[in-house]
Structures are given as structure tokens and as C-alpha cells.
Amino acid sequence: MPAPTADARRRELGDFLRSRRGRVTPQEAGIVPGPRRRTPGLRREEVAAAAGVSLTWYTWLEQGRVNGVSRQVLDSLARALRLGDAEHRHLLELAGEPAAEPPGPATVTREVRDLLAMVEPNLAHVVTRRFDLVAWNAPVDALLRTMPERPSGEDLNVVWLMFHSAWMRERFADWEAEARWLTALLRNEAGRQLGNPGFQRLVARLTATSPRFRAFWESHDITPFTPSERRFRHPDLGVVTLRYMKINVENDPDQSVLVHYAQPGSPAAEALARLSRA
């Protein structure tokens, strides 16, 4: 499907604003409606006043006649229209603005945790778009328990561990190619994350502390995620080749489930079964 034109995006933005304006009652906005009020939602002048913009400008915005809206104004409109997180993100996307950093720690739903358990003994974990590790199943936990020091906080990030953990370097049989590929995946996210301070902080930390990451990052190589296979080195199981794939979490665009799996009956499947019994 072709990307929407600028005119189409502006029209869609105007339609979205009108629809949200019609859903906010005067009472929700702290307005006492007069006895002769017939507007079911908010009037344009009420949204404009609440967002701190002129009525004329806001009218043009709803009519698709405005080129470029600042992030500050978009956030003000989101507050005036009482948008939820998903609606706020949609507003930013329609305006061509990168989404805000998700507030607070990532929340993994029960359905996603059930999926992690259902795919055992295969390895499965949940990552954000900047590759923070936010949940994993028992086989992954069995692997993490062998780490000399269990990472936490901002260090619980796949890219950070790839470049700073000797344990990770030992586990990936093709570390150089994996590290370069992971950096290109992170670089592929950079355009979407311009307004995300957490993403920028991660890149700044990596650039300052890892010459290898800095060299890979400055090459500006980008790649989309594609299912493939990788080789893991385990002190008890030897080198195990696993397929991997990514499942996007539909109700949270910031999260994905990564599954590493083996063909049933293969030596790799037996290795995973042994790992899950450890």
C-alpha cells in the first residue's frame, strides 16, 4: 500500500481531531453547559482555548490546511481532548512526529506471559523497540541464571549486553556478525525514536563506552528484522543452532516477542528440552 500523501495525512489528522472533540463532554472539560447548548462535544473555540492556540489556526488544522505542528502543541491538544496513550500516539503519527517514550516500566499482559509459557521448551522473551528485556520464559531464565552478574535497570538491554557482557560474547558463536546485525537493527529504529529520550540515552551510553559499537553505529548500516537462524554456544550443550522469529504485540507497538525454536525431534530440540529441565 503506498504511503499517504501529505494532503491525505492532513485530512486524516483533521478528521481525527473532530471525532475526538465530539467525544469529550463539556463536563469532562470542566465547562458548565448553558441551557441552549446543542453541541454534544466541545466547540472548536473551547479546544483552542484549552490548548493555547488561536481559534483560526485550530479551525485550519481541522480543515487540513496546516503544514507542520510542533510537538508541544500536539501534546497540548492531546491534553485538551483527553486522549489516551494509544490515541496520543496516533495523533503524533498522523502529524509525522515520533512517538513519546512509553511512560514508566513496560507492562507485559497476561496473554503475552501465557504465550511465553506455551512455547516452552523453546526460548522466548519480550523486548521493546530499543531492545530492553522486559519478560522471558523459564528456559531463558535458566540461561540467565548462568550469568556471573545478573543485569538490572538500564543494563537489562540486549544491545548493551551484546557489547558489554563477556557472557554474551561467549554464548554467540558468531558474535561479530550478530553484534553488527543488532546495531543495524537499532539504527533502523533511530528515525522513529528521535523524540524518545530513553533511546537517545542508550545510544549515547553505548557510543561512549564501546568502540566496537561506535564503529558499527557510525557506518549507518540499517536492516529490517527478518527471521533466520543463529548459533548458541552452551558449556553443557555445545553449539546449538536455532531458528528465530519475531511476533509483534498488537496492542503495544513498543513490544515484540522473540522466539528461538528447534524442529521437533532434532538434536537442537533435545538440547532445549535438557535446558528446560536444568
Image (tube, rainbow, N blue to C red):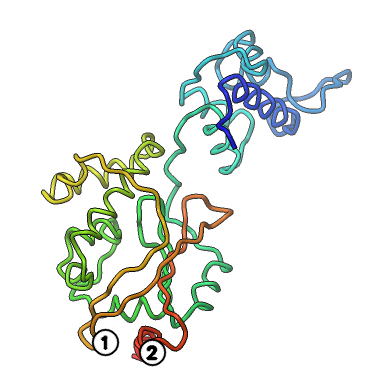
Q: Residue 235 is drawn in which quadrant?
A: bottom left
Closer-to-camera residue (71/217):
217
Q: Image height check: is 46 above or below 116?
A: above
The residue shown at (11%, 48%) is 211
Q: Residue furthest top?
A: 56
The residue shown at (21%, 66%) is 174
- Secondary structure of the residue carrying tag 2 is helix
Q: Is residue 89 left or right of residue 225?
A: right
Q: Image height check: is 26 above or below 187?
A: above
Return the residue at label 2.
Answer: 270
Residue type at mark 1: give it. Answer: Leu
Q: Image height check: is 225 above or below 135?
A: above
Q: Is residue 131 left or right of residue 216?
A: right
Q: Residues within 10 Å of mark 1 (few under 14, many from 20)?
A: some
- Secondary structure of the residue carrying tag 1 is loop
The residue shown at (76%, 25%) is 32
Q: Residue 50 is drawn in which quadrant?
A: top right
Image position, residue 4 (x, y; %) = 58, 28
Q: Residues within 10 Å of mark 2 (few under 14, many from 20)?
A: some
* Circle on res. 19: none
